[in-house]
Amino acid sequence: MAGVAALLRSARPDLTVDEIRTVLARTSRDLGPSFGRDEVFCFGRINAYRALQFVMGESWCYADLDDNGFLEPADFSAWVGLYNAGDLRADQNMNDVVEPADLNAFVLNYSVNTLCD
């Protein structure tokens, strides 16, 4: 984790520790039995590439919540689980608040395309 945090700080020296923590949580791949943070995997596997894309302002398929490169119905189920858990990965309009408006943003992000790069 320290290596990815250093990478993010080297790309954006203005980031605070809390901002880096939030980026790592938002861009990690969930591994637990339920969606969101858990005691075994915390927020999941760190995705350095996605975290770097995020801090550099590049986009990825926000709606691909199971991280398999495709937008599919399982991503909606994942979004519902994250939303119910209050997990920031459910924040599809990227305002750092999990709120009902994120459903509309998820639908928009989902409808953009069905194959993610």
Image: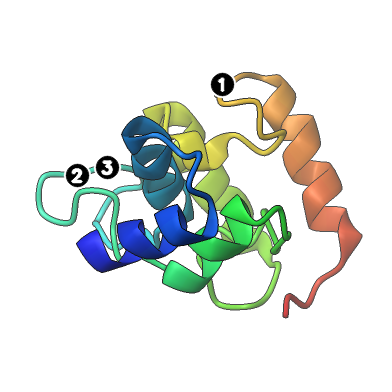
Label 2 close to label 3 by CB (< 8 Å): yes
Q: Which residue does the numbered mark 1 point to in the structure image?
A: 97
Relative to the observer, which residue lies in front, 60 or 115?
60
Q: Which residue does the numbered mark 2 point to in the structure image?
A: 38
Q: Quadrant of the C terminus?
A: bottom right
The residue most toward the right is 112
Q: Please name which of the two marks, 1 or 3, marks the residue nearer to the observer.
A: 1
Name above or below for residue 41 compared with residue 102: below
- Secondary structure at badge 1 equals loop
Q: Which residue does the numbered mark 3 point to in the structure image?
A: 37
Name above or below for residue 117 compared with residue 50: below
Marks 1 and 3, the one that precedes in the sequence: 3
Q: Amino acid at mark 2?
A: Asp
Q: Amino acid at mark 3?
A: Arg
Quadrant assignment, res 45:
bottom left
Residue 1 appears in the rendering: no
Name above or below for residue 104 compared with residue 44: above
- Secondary structure at badge 3 equals loop
